[in-house]
Image (spheres, helix red, strand yellow):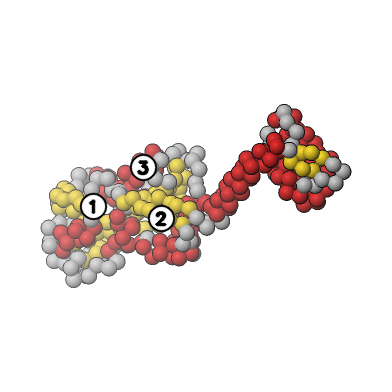
Amino acid sequence: MEVRHLVYFLEIAKFANFTRASESLHVSQPNLSKAIKLLENELGVTLFNRTTRTARLTEAGELLRLHAQGVANSLSGLQSAISDLTELRRGSIKIGIPPLIGARLFPGLIAKFIERHPAISLSFMEHGSKVLEQSVQEGTLEMAVVMLPVDESKFHIEPIINRVITLGVHPSHPLARREEVRIRDLRNEKFILFGNTFKVNISVREACIREGFEPNIIFESSHWDFIFEMVAANLGITLMPEVIFDRIEPDRIRVIRSLNPPIPWNVAIIWRKDDYLSHAARSFIDFARQAFHP
């Protein structure tokens, strides 16, 4: 049974006339008659009592009209719902964001996105990049903002930020007056870093190992503000993305923005390959791309 045949049937029932239904539907009368005949054959009943001027529903036809109207209403509702999604009148997105990125870079962007698309619901999961990658891979999250690199065989990648990791020390530290610091000069320092679920931690460790030493990590935290307080108390040094240092008071922490060799901090939005991405999610990715690369 074809839906369009039910639509034809309902239009004939509405006008009680094949000619007027044909004009309303812009379908020829022979095609209407053929569609109704197919319905009658399929159901094994007569649907209309026809005269030269009218087509009145039989008892079976009246029963079909009640059910067919429900089908037509459901189809119309489905079309409207899909239209709402594709035209971004509704939708929801669950996004993973690491704390250091969410705190500094995304509040303004999110506010502007909601202002433009007020009917789209946003929810967030806050964690380190490693955990967020796994959540996207498992389908718990539709997409996430993470530090690169990631496995490009598993994820689509939309790069949004290309920056570097910088050094923060107490103003009285011997390195505080330098414009550039070699990573090998940090061999004997005490490191205060994000936890090992954060790719910043991994990148710093790997950079130190390439320079011939394992960093002495005395404390790990998922909160950048607590790390800053530890450094401001002269308990150690920290390395984190330069954007996180932007609002730090220079009399509390001295920031050395040039490391040799540099440690890249590249950030992207990722989503799983071979997976459906909602229109709402696509619109957010486009919005973020334009915001970071106007």
Q: Amino acid at mark 1?
A: Ser
**Label number found at residue 9:** none
* Residue 266, horizontal then vertical, whole percent: 38, 53
Closer to the eye: label 1 or 2: 2
> What is the distance, in whole Å, between disc 3 and disc 2 at their CAs?
17 Å
Q: Amino acid at mark 3?
A: Ser
The furthest residue to the front: 59
Based on the displayed image, in which of its 4 quarters is residue 42 positioned? top right
> How many C-alpha atoms fall within 10 Å of the one at disc 2: few (<14), some, or many (≥20)?
some
Earlier along the polypeptide chain: callout 1 or callout 2?
2
* Residue 126, horizontal then vertical, whole percent: 31, 51
**Label number found at residue 135:** 3
Q: Is residue 68 above or below residue 268?
A: above
> How many C-alpha atoms fall within 10 Å of the one at disc 3: few (<14), some, or many (≥20)?
some
Asked if residue 235 can be seen in this view, the reply is yes
Closer to the eye: label 3 or 2: 2
> How many C-alpha atoms fall within 10 Å of the one at disc 1: few (<14), some, or many (≥20)?
some
Earlier along the polypeptide chain: callout 3 or callout 2?
2
* Residue 28, horizontal then vertical, whole percent: 83, 45
Q: Is residue 136 above or below residue 266?
A: above
Q: Nearer the viewer, residue 83 or 54?
A: 54
Q: Which residue is mark 2?
A: 122
> What is the distance, in whole Å, between disc 3 and disc 1 at their CAs?
18 Å
User: In the picture provided, is 126 more to the left or to the right than 10?
Assistant: left
Circle 2 SS class: strand
Q: Which residue is mark 1?
A: 222
Circle 3 SS class: helix
Q: Nearer the viewer, residue 254 or 245?
A: 245
Q: Nearer the viewer, residue 97 or 81?
A: 81
Circle 1 SS class: loop
Q: Quadrant of the N terminus?
A: top right
